[in-house]
Image: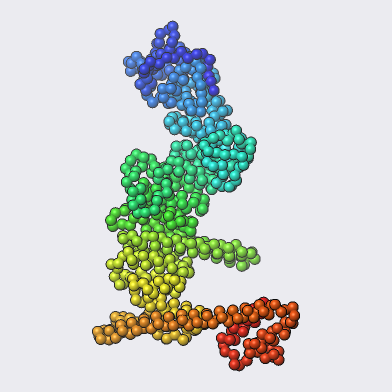
């Protein structure tokens, strides 16, 4: 917008500006060190504050009028002066706020002259700037330099209201230009708009007729705002009911643009953690600014669970550790991560310890424990909610399908978290400063039903024992107590049985439960095992030397008991090998009989068209000891053994099939 029609007659020489006129200057203004040599007459008609400024100069006995901290600076003062001379000035979203603040300072109101500069600026703001999307953002961004005038004149509030109103407009009705430099795929509606390719920041207006705007069309433009202005815009957008997913996506885009170094993906490895942890940006002005940005971002995150990805939350938490933000920020981020712990990957959990030294772990184990505690708290609340909903379904005559679905989802979440904890324990077990108490606390932070198989936990314990060879016997027994030998797989049992780092009692338990599993799979029963060993199935301990119920035991008796344990231990290994041999022989016989039955079945299948089914069955039965005159299909000759009896039943099923 242009005001005035006369050519520019202002000339600048170093720190002074003169007016090319036949009349000499009769008043001089010193505006923040820059001198303007002007004339009183054109200024008096439009500046309501000129008389006060002249009076102040006369009172101070100064030949110049001094103005410090003029709103908008020297350039805006010059534009206000040119307007009084009728010289053409150009207004834009970049300078309209400053000129408006300068005009307010000089009192260029309607009381001084009709249709004065303030009136024209307000018309330009309301009819042009605030109706445009990008113009509103530019004007808002420039207003930060003119505080507190821009705040008092409500220019900031009007720009924020204009921006938030446009954000909440239906995307199909967006008819203004906006920047969209990201790949043309909306992260929320996952709709790829055909015929449009984007490799740089471009305007949408020239192509908007091809397809409607995506739902996240506004994210990029507002990410250029200052953090304080961005905060106010987001709060206004929230107040107008924008979807929390969009708000969270906007915060993520803004964070990655303002904190690119802090939110980068750190490579795995202890050395990299230390390098990018404490020494990169500590005690600098940039770190102070980043800390303020990070704390503001955390307060803006939507409260709804799942709106922000767990990976993004963990990056924020890692940055808060590096920047040493307040404890409340770290606690809030840890709580949010805990609510979505089943979505986390192991690499995301590599967070440098806040107080890393030779006495502390490289990674913050306390944070991981806090994650699990927050997760379990929310899990119990969800479980109570599900139980209440189930009771409502039962007594309210409502279908309970949703309850079963939620129960299955929560159970799957528990399994995922347990797997993640075991992986984390295995990853950090090699840390020489990982304390036994923290290892056990983290391992026991989940309920028993969350781990149907303890292979991952056994792997973590084995690594810890290997990397901490100085553990005492009681400490090794204590760390192994968190593992249930009955929940180990066949491969884990075989490895544990040969693991000399495990306590003797744990190895005996592993061998026993492996023997029980093998016996059951081979058709044996637990009652056939020795009674002293059956006690392990019900949790009874093996009486080892030195644990004689507190009574004194002679050294000779102790040696005898140790010999007894050694003999029992050797017997367990021998029995296990014997049972495996018996199972192998049984499997071999079963495969032979199954092959024989299959061949007979194929021959029988070839003559089905010639022989009747009853004759075919009589033929099969007679070959396996059945009487051809028997009418019952289940009558078996007394001479047939139990194994043959089972094989005949299998053949019968195959033949009928």
**Residue situated in front as seen by the camera: 170 or 651:** 651
Quadrant holding the N terminus: top right
Quadrant holding the C terminus: bottom right
Name the spot of residue 141 as percent of width and height, x first: 47, 33
**Residue situated in front as seen by the camera: 549 or 98:** 549
Query: Which residue shows up at 41% across the image and 77% down it?
Result: 511
Count of marks overlaid on the render: 0
Name the spot of residue 227 as percent of width and height, x first: 44, 39
The outermost residue toward the bottom is: 638
**Residue situated in front as seen by the camera: 110 or 42:** 42
Relative to residue 103, is residue 191 depicted above or below? below
Query: Which residue shows up at 40% across the image and 58% down it?
Result: 368
Query: Which residue shows up at 52% across the image and 36% down it?
Result: 201
Name the spot of residue 66 as percent of width and height, x first: 36, 20
The outermost residue toward the top is: 22
Q: Is residue 598 visible?
A: yes
Q: Is residue 539 visible?
A: no
Q: Quadrant of residue 195?
A: top right
The outermost residue toward the left is: 555
**Residue situated in front as seen by the camera: 76 or 578:** 578
Q: Is residue 316 left or right of residue 612?
A: left
Q: Quadrant of residue 441?
A: bottom left
Relative to residue 584, is residue 333 depicted above or below? above
Query: Which residue shows up at 58% across the image and 63% down it?
Result: 405
């Amino acid at each position: 917008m242009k005001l005035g029609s006369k050519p520019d007659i202002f000339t600048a020489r170093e720190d002074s500006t003169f007016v090319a006129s036949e009349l000499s200057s009769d008043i001089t203004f010193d505006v923040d060190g820059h001198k303007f040599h002007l004339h009183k007459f054109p200024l008096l008609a439009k500046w309501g504050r000129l008389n006060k400024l002249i009076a102040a100069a006369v009172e101070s006995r100064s030949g110049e009028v001094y103005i410090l901290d003029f709103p908008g600076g020297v350039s805006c003062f010059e534009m206000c002066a040119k307007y009084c001379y009728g010289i053409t000035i150009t207004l834009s979203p970049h300078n309209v706020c400053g000129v408006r603040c300068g005009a307010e300072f000089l009192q260029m109101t309607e009381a001084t002259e009709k249709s004065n500069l303030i009136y024209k600026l307000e018309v330009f703001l309301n009819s042009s700037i605030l109706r445009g999307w990008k113009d509103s953002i530019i004007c808002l961004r420039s207003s930060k330099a003119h505080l507190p005038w821009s705040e008092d004149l409500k220019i900031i509030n009007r720009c924020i209201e204009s921006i938030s109103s446009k954000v909440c407009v239906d995307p199909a009705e967006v008819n203004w230009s906006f920047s969209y430099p990201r790949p043309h795929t909306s992260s929320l509606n996952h709709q790829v708009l055909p015929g449009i390719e984007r490799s740089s920041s471009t305007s949408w207006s020239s192509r908007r007729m091809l397809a409607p705007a995506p739902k996240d069309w506004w994210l990029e433009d507002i990410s250029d705002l200052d953090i304080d202005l961005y905060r106010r815009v987001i709060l206004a957008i929230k107040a107008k009911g924008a979807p929390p997913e969009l708000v969270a996506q906007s915060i993520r885009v803004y964070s990655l643009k303002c904190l690119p170094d802090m939110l980068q993906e750190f490579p795995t490895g202890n050395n990299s953690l230390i390098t990018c942890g404490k020494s990169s940006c500590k005690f600098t002005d940039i770190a102070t600014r980043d800390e303020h940005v990070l704390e503001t971002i955390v307060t803006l995150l939507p409260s709804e669970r799942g709106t922000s990805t767990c990976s993004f939350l963990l990056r924020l938490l890692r940055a808060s550790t590096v920047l040493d933000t307040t404890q409340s920020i770290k606690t809030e981020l840890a709580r949010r991560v805990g609510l979505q712990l089943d979505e986390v990957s192991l690499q995301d959990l590599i967070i440098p310890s806040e107080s890393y030294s030779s006495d502390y772990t490289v990674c913050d184990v306390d944070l991981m424990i806090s994650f699990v505690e927050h997760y379990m708290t929310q899990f119990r609340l969800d479980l109570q909610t599900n139980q209440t909903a189930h009771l409502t379904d039962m007594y309210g005559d409502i279908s309970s399908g949703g309850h079963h679905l939620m129960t299955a989802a929560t159970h799957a979440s528990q399994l995922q978290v347990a797997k993640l904890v075991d992986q984390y324990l295995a990853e950090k077990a090699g840390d020489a400063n990982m304390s036994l108490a923290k290892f056990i606390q983290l391992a026991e932070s989940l309920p028993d039903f969350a781990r149907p198989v303890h292979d991952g936990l056994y792997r973590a314990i084995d690594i810890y024992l290997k990397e901490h060879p100085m553990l005492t016997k009681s400490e090794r027994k204590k760390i192994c107590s968190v593992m249930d030998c009955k929940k180990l797989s066949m491969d884990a049992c075989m490895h544990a049985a040969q693991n000399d780092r495990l306590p003797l009692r744990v190895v005996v338990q592993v061998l026993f439960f492996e023997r029980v599993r093998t016996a059951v799979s081979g058709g044996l029963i637990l009652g056939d095992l020795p009674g002293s060993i059956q006690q392990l199935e019900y949790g009874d301990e093996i009486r080892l030397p030195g644990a004689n119920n507190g009574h004194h035991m002679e050294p000779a008796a102790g040696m005898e008991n140790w010999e007894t344990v050694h003999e029992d231990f050797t017997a367990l290994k021998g029995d296990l090998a014997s049972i495996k041999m018996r199972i192998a022989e049984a499997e071999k016989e079963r495969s032979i009989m199954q092959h024989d039955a299959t061949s007979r079945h194929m021959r029988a299948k070839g003559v089905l068209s010639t022989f009747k089914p009853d004759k075919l069955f009589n033929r099969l039965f007679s070959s396996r000891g059945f009487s051809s005159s028997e009418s019952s299909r289940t009558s078996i000759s007394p001479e047939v053994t139990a194994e043959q009896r089972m094989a005949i039943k299998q053949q019968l099923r195959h033949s009928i099939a």
